Image: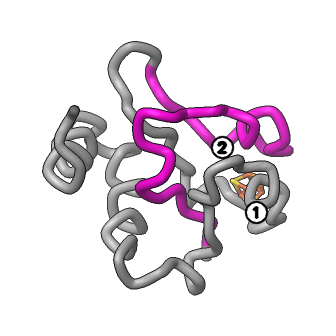
Amino acid sequence: MAYVITEPCIDVMDKSCVEVCPVDCIHYEEGKDRKLYIDPDECIDCGACEPVCPVTAIFAEDDVPDQYKDYIEIDALWYKDADAARARVNELKPPA
Ligand code: SF4
């Protein structure tokens, strides 16, 4: 299992989660990404990131609300093909 960053992060990217993650498994590329991504292979499920997110974007995989389920796949995809993940994000929430 892993934690997942969902839609409320888009265009917010507060980054408090990055500061508290003990294994540095939350990544993004400045200027290219509209949200942050958790590496599901590196996440140790500690839960430290979830309460510090000011927009409640982070959930344990099993607790991701139905309307945000796509982000489970999208976070993992970013670590294999970042552009494909960015395209999925833009489909789900087109840039303003
Ligand atoms: Fe990092 Fe822990 Fe959050 Fe996983 S649950 S992303 S290890 S802070």
Question: Is residue 84 among what the camera can see?
Answer: no
Relative to 15, is 29 above or below? above
Task: Tell me the residue at 75%/68% (across/down).
Answer: 45
Chain part drawn in magenta: 2-29
CB under 8 Å between discs 1 and 2: yes
Q: Nearer the viewer, residue 90 or 3?
A: 90
Q: Quadrant of the N terminus?
A: bottom right
Residue carrying label 1: 44
* Residue 71 position within the rendered picture, expressed as x and y whole percent measured from the top left: 38, 63
Mark 2: which secondary structure?
loop
Quadrant of ligand 1: it is bottom right
Of callouts 1 and 2, which one flags the residue occurring earlier in the amino acid sequence? 2
Mark 2 — residue?
25
Q: Give the SS element for disc 1.
A: loop
Q: Quadrant of residue 57?
A: bottom right
Q: Is residue 9 magenta?
A: yes
For this orientation, the residue located farthest to the top is 31
Residue 90 appears in view = yes
Q: Does ligand 1 reach within 8 Å of label 2's beta carbon?
A: yes
